[in-house]
Image (tube, rainbow, N blue to C red):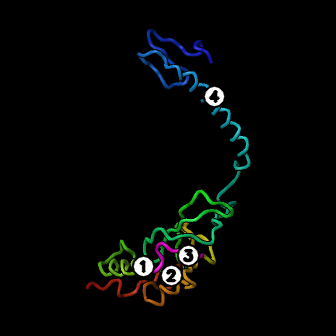
Amino acid sequence: MSMSQCWKTASNILCCCNRFKRSSKPTPSNCLDQATTNIEHSSKIKHVDVNLMYLNNVLYKDTVTFVPPIKNGKVVKVYDGDTITIASVLPNTTEPIYRFSVRLSGIDSAEIKGKTAAEKKIAIEARDALYDFIFGKIVYLKNITTEKYGRILADVYCDNIHINKWMLDNNLAVPYDGGTKIRPNEWDNEA
C-alpha cells in the first residue's frame, strides 16, 4: 500500500485504515503497516465465513448441549452446598487449564442469597462443610450431563466418598431431581 492510497484533506491526512482521521500530525509510519494488516485480516475473515456456511440453516433444535469431556479436576472454589468450581484440562492435553462449574447431581442446598436469615445461615454451614471436605482436593466426576443453566451436573467423588450422598447424609442438602425444589421448613424458621 502506498501513500497515494491515503487521502489528503487540507493540511490533514485521512488515512484509509481509519486510525488517523482528521489528524493534525503527519501520518505515522506504521499507518501503512496497519492498513496492510487490516486487509490481510479481512481476507482471513472471508475465508472463515466460507467455511462456516454449513451453519446458515442450523436451528436451536438441531443442536445438542456440549458436555465437556472431563472426568476429574481440582476443586478451586466452593460456591455453595451444591455448586463447586474445578480446574481441569481437556483429554490428552496439559494446557490450558480451564475452570468448570459443577453442580452436584440429585441434591439442593440452601441458598446463600436465600429468602430468610435462617436459610442463609444453613447455606453458609453447608458451603463451609463442603469446603472443608473437598477444597484443594482432586475430585472425580461420574454420570456427567449438563443442567438447565449450562453447568456440568455430576456425581462427585473425593477420597472414594460420594460427596452428593455425603451432603444428604449430613443434612446439608435435600434431594432434588431437577423439578420443583423442596423447601424444608427449617429454611423458613427465623431464629
Q: Where in the figure is residue 68, as x and y percent of width and height?
A: 63, 65
| Quadrant location, the C terminus | bottom left
Q: Where in the figure is residue 167, as x and y percent of width and height?
A: 47, 85
Query: Disc 1 and disc 3: Cα gap in Å?
Result: 14 Å
Vertical side of 190 occupied by 44: above or below: above
Identify the disc placed on residue 170: none
Which of the pair 152/60 is nearer the observer?
152
Residue at 44 percent across and 89 percent down: it is 170
- The amino acid on which the numbered mark 2 sits, given as a three-letter code, is Ile
Residue at 68 percent across and 32 percent down: it is 43
Query: Are discs 4 and 2 less than 8 Å apart at CB?
Result: no
137 part of magenta stretch: yes
- The amino acid on which the numbered mark 3 sits, given as a three-letter code, is Val
Residue matched to label 3: 139
Query: Disc 1 and disc 2: Cα gap in Å?
Result: 18 Å
Residue at 47 percent across and 22 percent down: it is 20
Identify the disc placed on residue 132: 1
Locate residue 115 relative to residue 5 in the image: left or right. Answer: left
Query: Over which residues does the magenta segment extend?
Result: 130-140
Which residue is farthest left? 191
113 part of magenta stretch: no
Q: Which label sits in the foreground, 4 or 2?
A: 4
Q: Which label sits in the foreground, 1 or 2?
A: 1
Earlier in the chain: of badge 1 and badge 4, it is: 4
